[in-house]
Amino acid sequence: MRLNKIHIVLILVGALVLGFVGAYVGVLIANPDQAEQKIDDSSSKEKVDSTDQNANLPAEWSKVAQAYNLIKENYLEGADEQQLMTGAIEGMLSTLEDPYSTYMDVETMKQFNEQIESSFEGIGAEVSMVNGVVTIVSPIKDSPAEKAGLRPNDQVLKVDGKSLEGLDLNQAVSKIRGKKGTEVVVTILRGGSSEPFDVTIVRDTIPIETVYSKMETINGKKTGIIEVTNFAETTSKDFNTQLKALEDDGMEGLIIDVRGNPGGLLSSVEEILANFIPKDVPYVQIEDQEGNKTPYYSDLKKKKSYPISVLINEGSASASEILAVAMKEVGYDIVGMNSFGKGTVQQTVPLGDGSTLKLTFFKWLSPEGNWIHKKGVEPTVKVKEPEYYYTNPVQIEEPLAYDESDVKIKNIQLMLNGLGYKTDRKDGYFSKSTEEAVKEFQKKNNLKVTGTVDKETGGLIEAKVIEKIRTGEDDLQLEKAQQELYK
C-alpha cells in the first residue's frame, strides 16, 4: 500500500481531474465540500410528492407567479422557462446566505454523485491552469492518460481539434471528459519540443482512491500512517481494511492525515470514528432547527492501546473536522494548523426531474457539545509548513528582471529558496543574488541562462515546487506528529 502525498498547497488551488469536477487537490480551500447525509430517493420523492405544495405557499406567492408570467410573455429578448425556474430557486437560496445550500441541476448532480461514489469516467489526469494554459499536473497511476504517455507539465492546447484558449478550467475539463469507451484527441505541447502533437486516448472508468497507508519505523517503533483525502462511499471500508492490515503487521502507533480533506459523507466518518471513540462518549452530536441534540455512540469498549495523532490544516473541513475534534476531545494529539470551520450538515432532496436541492438541515457538535462553525478545530500542537508550501501560481506577462520590485518576485524568491536556490532577500526586490539564483536554476534545468524570469522559467520553477511538495519533502507537520507520537 502506498501513501499518496496530497496536502494543502495554495499553488495547486484550481486543479481538477480530467473528467471529474472537484478533485481533492483542486478545491480544498476555495470551496470545501460538505458532510452529507444522503436521503434515499424513494423516501425523498414520497415526501415531496405527497405534500400539498400549494397549501404551504404564502399569500404573497402570487407576486412570484405574476413576475414569472410577465417576464416569460413580455421580455424583449425572450426568456427560457427552465432558466426562469432555476433562477427563482437559486434566488431563494441566495437570500439564506448559506454557501452550502445549493441547487444542483441534472449535470451538476451527476458530477456530485461521481465524487461521493469515488469514481468517474474520463482519461485520468490531474490538471491545473498554468499561465492560462491547461497543464497536466500528474496522470493517475494506470489511467488511460498514463498509458497514452502523458507526462507532468504537458500543456493541453486542443481537444478534438478545437482550441481551449479562452476557456476556464471547468470548461476545458468538460471538453475532455466523456463516457467510457469513447475516444478523445488531445493536442499536447511538451517542454523541449517546439511542435505540438496529437494523442488519441480512450476514456475509461477511473477509480478515485481516498485512503492511502504505509508503515514506517519511527524511534524504533512500527508506525502506521493513513491518509484520507475525502470521505466517499467506500472510504470507511477501505480505511478499516488498511487499519486492520497495519495492526496485523504489529503497528505500535498511528498517524491519521486529513490535511486538505474537504469532507464528504457523514456516514463515512462515523464508521471510521467507531474504531477510536469508546461507547461512553458520543463521537458526534446532531442539533436540529429547534435546538434538540441527538448524540451518536459507537459500540467500542475501550480506546486503542497504541498512541494516535491526527494531522489537520486549513483545508481540513466538515467531516474531517468531525474526526479531528472527536479525537481531540478524547485525548489524542491534533497536529498542524487550525481547520476550515464548517459545522453544518446538508441533505440532498431530489426535486423529481433529476435536479436536487442540497439544503442545510442540522448543526453538528463535538462530543462535548462545541460548535466549530467558522472557528475550526484548533490543533493541540500548532505547526506551519515551510514558506514555499504556501506560494501562489506563477503568472507572468512581462519577464521579471534585476532591479524590479513586485509581489510576483517575492513569490518567485520563496519558491527558489524552497528549491535550494538561495536569494539574499524575500521581499520582492529583484536583487543580484536573486538574479544569480535564477541563472543557477536555468543552467541546472537546461534553460537559456538570462537571469530573468519569463513564462518558461517561471512555469518550470512552479512545476518543480509542486513536484517537491508532492514527494512530502520538508513536511514539518508530519515530522512533528511523528515526534509527538512517542514523546
Image: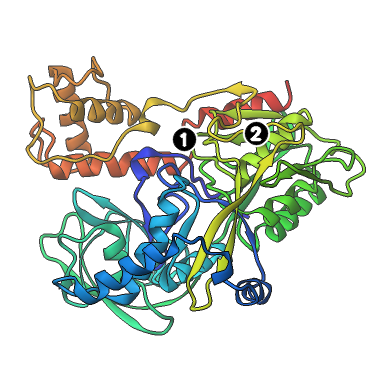
Density class for disc 1 (Cα within 10 Å; few <14, some 14-19, many ≥20) is: few
278 above or below 414?
below
Residue 39: percent from left, percent from top: 65, 66
Which mark, by number, is residue 473?
A: 1
Left or right side of 182 for 45: right
| Residue 24 in sight here | yes
Quarter of image, res 329:
top right
- Which residue is situated farthest in the front direction here? 59
| Residue 138 in sight here | no
Residue 480: percent from left, percent from top: 60, 25
Assign a secondary structure to mark 1: loop
Identify the residue shown where x is 10% and y is 30%: 451
Assign a secondary structure to mark 2: loop
- Return the residue at label 2: 371
249 above or below 115?
above
- Which residue is situated farthest in the top direction here? 424
Identify the residue shown where x is 75% and y is 49%: 246
Q: Quadrant of the N terminus?
A: bottom right
Q: Nearer the viewer, mark 1 or mark 2?
A: 2
